[in-house]
Image (cartoon, rainbow, N blue to C red):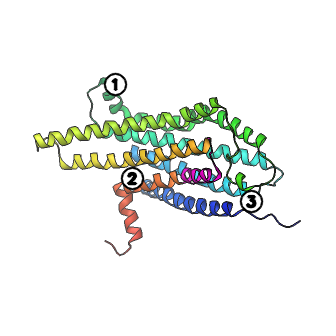
Amino acid sequence: MGAEIIPVFNIIFLIITSTVSVIGILASAFIVTLNLLDWGKGRRLNTCDLILVTLGISCTCFQCTVVGKSYFYVLCRASLNFDNIYTALFTLHVYTGRTSLWLTASLCVFYCMKIVDLNHWLYIWLKLRISKLVPWLLLGSFVVSPLLNMPLYWSACKVFFEHTTPNLTANAAVPGFEMRWTLWHDLAIMLLDLCLPLLVCMACISLILTSLYRHTRRMKDSPSGFSKAHLEAHFRVARVVGSLLLVYIFLTLAELAYTIPYSYQVSLVAQIIISSSAPAQSIILILGNAKLKKVMLRILSPRRK
């Protein structure tokens, strides 16, 4: 018998996934490395930098699992221990991906608390203690989310192996195409994995935009009431959180298409969008941070002073 020929869709899928993952790993590693270098020089990491470093590490791990899972599925489908190894890779992939989503929600909450002013007593209490609460938010992202979601994904992964044939076909190129989850699994996954962090991000951008509107109105009525720098900070945070929310929405739509696949092509596109979410997020964070953006421009344009 001749050697197994890899379908062209699989090759294209691996090329795109690899390219996206390299970009994501480089961008996330840049965020982590720059902040750790500053920390090594004696500068204390502030709360925002701590979140960025944690998020960068999580996104790096996520992209590594994307590459490992994709290559192992396509190239090692006939392996004797394929089921066990792929289940482990898939579990790590989901764990790092969902953790990154909750870390992003934590970052949006931090930005919101720092930039928005409200008179509600609970909001004021949280605003005064946000720096001390951030480590608990980060810990919750790593612990609570996996405990809620891993059993569902573990069960879904087992269903996948029970309903797939041992031979590699074009329609089985992307894991999950032949998966048929129950309605309970679908609703639980969407609620726990996507909807709650998405609602947090939407609430944050709503508060930020409302605060921005009020500040611009006050500046028109009383130009000396708010500084231009404060207004610029509002615009910068609004752009960052709004861009993260846009990436989050595309990710949610891709997850829906991937969970309930309609065709092989749709499943391929959905998987690529899911893999591209972390690189897009890292690039947004770099462009939205003055320090990171300055160093990045210096690296890309060495002659620029």
Image point 46% across, 38% down: which residue?
198
Camera-side residue of 147 and 243 = 243
Q: Which image quarter is the C terminus in?
A: bottom left
- In this image, 95 relative to 277: left or right? right
Crowd tier of the residue under label 1, counting other residues whose Cα lies within 10 Å: few below 14, some 14–19, many 20 or above:
few
**Image depth: mark 1 or mark 2 in front:** 1
Q: Which residue corresponds to mark 2?
A: 43
Whether residue 135 is visible, yes or no, is no
Mark sitting on residue 75: 3
Would you name the residue on which mark 1 appears? 122
Magenta-colored stretch includes residue 79: no
| Percent of width and height locating residue 232 | 25, 50
- What's the residue type where badge 3 is placed? Leu
224 left or right of 90 in image = left
Range covered by the magenta-colored residues: 260-275
| Image quarter of the N terminus | bottom right
Q: Nearer the viewer, residue 78 or 127?
A: 78
